[in-house]
Image: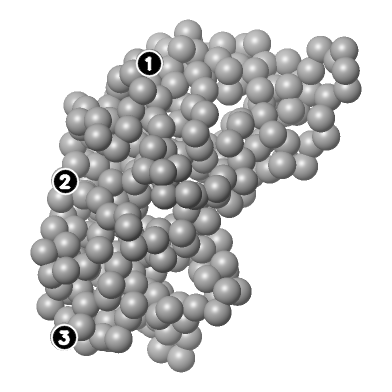
């Protein structure tokens, strides 16, 4: 397949490009610097609506992963605007460009997030569950709606609602590891909030699966089948690292550090189930948290009788 990818330099984009090239696909990349045409790079700038759609002719699919990092820095008004616009305006730009092509690609795999559901305590959430409330839920709802021009042009659009991506190379796990390795990790607040997670490797495999699975369009939950509470996550990570994980972080402290972002990033509870992926026959490599963490951190299983 000939595939164009935005966000190709990120944690998932980098791994996806490598995986697609390895399996024989031709990959092109959106970049925001002077493009190296010989390497299949195409310039775009969603902030100024710059995109030469003529360079998109002849593609079979697009994977749209670009967006401002939501976990870096406090959520000032300017930061929230960048988070929102980088997703909504960027998606609208590429969707309109694809819709105007002489031969639009067959598929557009567009990132979204489980933030779509908002804070839902212990409710089991499927792709049929309605959107929640809050900044992230509104952003995800508008993000998905922005792909409408491509869908109306006959492109199969998939909204990949991604959970917490686990990788020692980046994201939430990499941020947690220094404290947990020192025995200073623990639950956040009461730790009752659900965390819907997926390993980076499984997420790359999910995207590759969706490129070829013509039966799937619309929302698809990209999470492992077994979400855990934050308390369970902290206990499992401590066990895998063979360190105590009993130092809770008070909610007030995190609010002082992160502002309102703490409520939606760290304390919103999303118990999400990948109903459509499982029905379509996708096979996970990592369905349970503790074995997934052992694989990611190359940690052996604890011996019988060990406190860890």
Residue at screen point 40% across, 25% down? 271
Residue 101, given in percent of the width and then of the height, sits at 17, 81
Q: How many marks?
A: 3
Q: In the current view of this chain or complex, which residue is farthest to the bottom? A: 38
Residue 11 vs 104, above or below: the answer is: above
Q: In which quarter of the image is residue 46?
A: bottom left
| C-alpha separation, residue under disc 1 versus residue under disc 3 | 47 Å
Is residue 180 toward the left or the right of residue 304 in the image? left
**Residue that numbered label 3 is attached to:** 102
126 or 101: which is nearer to us?
Answer: 126
Residue 213 visible from this viewpoint:
yes
Q: In this view, does 306 lie to the left or right of 177?
A: right
Q: Quadrant of residue 141?
A: top left
Q: Is mark 2 on a helix, strand or loop?
A: helix
Residue, disc 2: 142
Label 1 neighbour load within 10 Å: few <14, some 14-19, many 20+: some
For label 3, the crowd category at 10 Å Cα-Cα, with few meaning under 14, some 14 to 19 and many 20 or more, is few
In the image, residue 112 above or below residue 185? below
Q: Distance between the residues labelled 2 and 3?
A: 27 Å
Q: What's the mark number on residue 213?
A: none
Residue 7 drawn at (x, y percent): 40, 62
| Disc sitting over residue 122 in the figure | 1
* 237 displayed left or right of 271: right
């Amino acid at each position: 397949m000939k595939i164009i990818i935005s966000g190709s330099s990120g944690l998932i984009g980098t791994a996806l490009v490598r995986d697609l090239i390895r399996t024989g696909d031709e990959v092109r990349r959106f970049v925001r610097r002077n493009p190296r045409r010989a390497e299949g790079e195409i310039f775009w700038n969603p902030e100024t609506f710059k995109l030469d759609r003529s360079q998109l002719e002849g593609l079979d699919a697009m994977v749209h992963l670009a967006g401002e990092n939501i976990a870096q820095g406090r959520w000032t008004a300017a930061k929230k605007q960048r988070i929102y616009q980088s997703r909504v305006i960027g998606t609208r730009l590429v969707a309109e460009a694809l819709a105007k092509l002489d031969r639009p690609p067959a598929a557009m795999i567009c990132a979204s997030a489980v933030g779509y559901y908002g804070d839902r305590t212990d409710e089991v959430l499927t792709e049929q569950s309605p959107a929640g409330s809050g900044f992230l839920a509104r952003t995800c709802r508008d993000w998905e709606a922005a792909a409408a021009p491509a869908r109306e042009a006959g492109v199969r659009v998939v909204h990949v609602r991604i959970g917490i991506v686990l990788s020692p190379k980046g994201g939430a796990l990499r941020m947690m590891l220094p404290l947990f390795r020192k025995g200073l990790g623990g639950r956040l607040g009461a730790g009752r909030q659900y965390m819907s997670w997926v390993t980076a490797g499984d997420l790359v495999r999910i995207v590759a699966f969706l490129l070829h699975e013509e039966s799937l369009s619309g929302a698809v939950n990209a999470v492992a089948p077994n979400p855990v509470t934050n308390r369970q996550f902290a206990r499992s990570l401590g066990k895998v690292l063979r360190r105590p994980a009993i130092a809770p972080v008070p909610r007030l402290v995190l609010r002082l550090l992160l502002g309102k972002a703490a409520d939606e990033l760290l304390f919103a509870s999303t118990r999400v189930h990948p109903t459509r992926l499982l029905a379509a026959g996708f096979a996970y490599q990592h369905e349970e948290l503790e074995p997934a963490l052992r694989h990611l951190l190359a940690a052996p299983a604890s011996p019988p009788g060990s406190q860890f």
